[in-house]
Image (cartoon, rainbow, N blue to C red):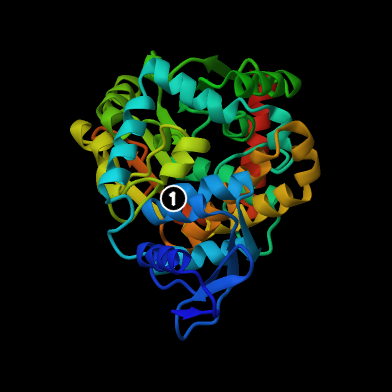
């Protein structure tokens, strides 16, 4: 390590231990009055300024959680590009080390117990994240308030264009047909349900336990004259009843908890039986690992990002056949670029709405998520599937890449059906 002269022994030792924990990331750590440390042979991409000894000690024991807490509190400052700094850490982090110490295992298990995704626990977890206020999310999401990975037909597409493209991409993967009945588990602010009804002539029953989101979705349905085709239900998806042709879940599997995958599969089979089809869209991982304990603590309680193998536990017991698997990881990194840019432009407004801790914590969450998708720490999977008796499986994948004229014609057909029904 390279040190400045006069570096106190304790601080020097603590910084060495921090680098042992995170690996030789190309970062400069600075403490108090200019003492700094950098791994040998690297050009630092950013400087991490630590303001007190307590923070240094905490980072030695648990660098992820204590960095998050100190950054949000203002006890750590990142001089330089925050996303690049976090990418550097993810890329240098020793393989298999994250969350492996006895202390980290204990805190992870404690969080599992505190944030159980039971019927009651899920409602509390969702409330802490999604019921922060629609005005907050309006500041940095797209105009339809789609809070999941967008699909960019080209890197130059706007966020609005990419979210609209994602909604339609999902509909094409589902091979929706006019008049079908669709159930959506975890509907956000209602964009997908409304898109399906408006442009594909289907009937949708959408479930969500976020009160704020449901109110917004119902208002949109009424304004668009779609209340007769879309029903938004404020209830847990485990309480879904009725028969449907299609099951879809976008950005919800992360909140279910791996212990409840069997229950979700049972719900799906109850809804669409052996003849239905569906799609799961979710944040995942390439290998089993502990989901960010700081994000679970401060931003997303109860969250877990499964591997593809773990997600199969939802489908396999009922012999659902996987039709298509796609990884949209670069698209989520791009989505987060747009979100973070809009978030930064709205910092003054956000600061006036919440305490000073809040915008710093959320900026770290968005930047850290972008870095995770850029480096492959996180993935974004879409799995389309069908029951063993489904007769609606397309012959080719050509429908996924249909041109804009075909989409326009389908929308006109759906609009005509709605007008004459």
Q: Residue at x 75, y 39 (%)?
A: 351
Q: Nearer the viewer, residue 44 or 269?
A: 44
- Residue 270 point in image, percent of width and height: 30, 19
Label 1 crowd bin: few (<14), some (14–19), many (20+), radius 10 Å: some
In the picture, the quarter occupied by the N terminus is: bottom left
Point out the image quarter for the C terminus. Answer: top right
Q: Nearer the viewer, residue 401 or 325?
A: 325
Percent x, y for residue 297? Answer: 46, 36
Residue 391 falls in image quadrant: top left
Q: In the image, is 43 to the left or to the right of 103?
A: right
- The total number of labels drawn is 1
| Residue 229: quadrant of the picture | top right
Snapshot quadrant of residue 293: top left
Image position of 170 with respect to 9: above or below = above
Whole-percent x, y for residue 147 in the image: 59, 40
Name the side, left or right, on which 176 lies relative to 221: left
Residue at image location 75% in from the left, 38% down from the top: 350
Mark 1 = which residue?
58
Out of 2 and 226, give the one closest to the viewer.
Answer: 2
Q: Position of residue 131 (x, y in %)?
A: 61, 25
Q: Is residue 186 visible?
A: yes
SS category of the residue bearing label 1: helix
| In this rendering, position of residue 111 left or right of residue 220 | left
> Considering only vertical position in the picture, is 301 above or below 35?
above
Q: Is residue 116 visible?
A: no
- Compared with 329, 267 (above or below) is above
Extreme residue in the bottom direction? 41
Foreground residue, 9 or 250? 9
Residue drawn where x is 46% and y is 64% of the image: 89
């Amino acid at each position: 390590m390279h040190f400045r002269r006069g570096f106190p022994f304790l601080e020097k030792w603590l910084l060495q231990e921090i680098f042992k924990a995170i690996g030789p990331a190309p970062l400069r750590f600075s403490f108090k009055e200019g003492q700094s440390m950098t791994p040998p042979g690297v050009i630092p991409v950013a400087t991490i300024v630590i303001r007190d000894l307590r923070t240094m000690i905490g980072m030695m024991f648990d660098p992820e959680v204590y960095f998050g807490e100190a950054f949000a509190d203002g006890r750590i400052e990142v001089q330089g590009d925050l996303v690049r700094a976090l990418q550097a850490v993810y890329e240098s982090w020793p393989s298999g080390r994250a969350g492996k110490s006895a202390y980290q295992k204990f805190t992870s298990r404690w969080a599992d117990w505190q944030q159980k995704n039971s019927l009651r626990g899920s409602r509390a977890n969702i409330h802490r994240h999604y019921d922060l206020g629609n005005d907050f999310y309006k500041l940095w999401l797209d105009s339809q308030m789609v809070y999941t990975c967008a699909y960019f037909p080209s890197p130059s597409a706007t966020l609005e264009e990419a979210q609209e493209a994602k909604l339609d991409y999902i509909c094409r993967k589902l091979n929706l047909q006019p008049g079908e009945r669709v159930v959506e588990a975890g509907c956000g602010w209602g964009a997908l349900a409304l898109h399906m009804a408006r442009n594909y002539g289907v009937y949708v029953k959408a479930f969500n336990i976020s009160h704020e989101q449901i109110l917004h979705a119902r208002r949109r349905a009424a304004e668009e004259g779609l209340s007769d085709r879309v029903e938004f239900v404020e209830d847990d998806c485990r309480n879904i009843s009725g028969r449907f042709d299609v099951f879809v879940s976008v950005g919800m599997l992360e909140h279910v908890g791996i212990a409840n995958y069997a229950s979700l599969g049972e719900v799906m089979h109850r809804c669409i039986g052996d003849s239905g089809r569906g799609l799961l869209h979710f944040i995942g991982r390439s290998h089993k690992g502990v989901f960010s304990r700081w994000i679970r603590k401060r931003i997303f309680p109860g969250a877990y990002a499964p591997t593809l193998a773990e997600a199969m536990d939802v489908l396999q017991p009922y012999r659902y056949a996987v039709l298509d698997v796609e990884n949209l990881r670069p698209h989520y990194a791009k989505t987060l670029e747009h979100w973070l840019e809009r978030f930064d432009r709205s910092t003054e407004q956000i600061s006036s709405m919440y305490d000073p801790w809040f915008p710093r914590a959320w900026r770290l969450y968005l930047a850290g998520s972008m870095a995770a998708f850029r480096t492959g720490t996180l993935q974004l999977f879409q799995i389309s599937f069908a029951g063993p008796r489904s007769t609606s499986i397309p012959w080719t994948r050509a429908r996924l890449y249909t041109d804009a004229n075909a989409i326009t014609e389908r929308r006109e057909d759906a609009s005509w059906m709605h007008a004459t029904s």
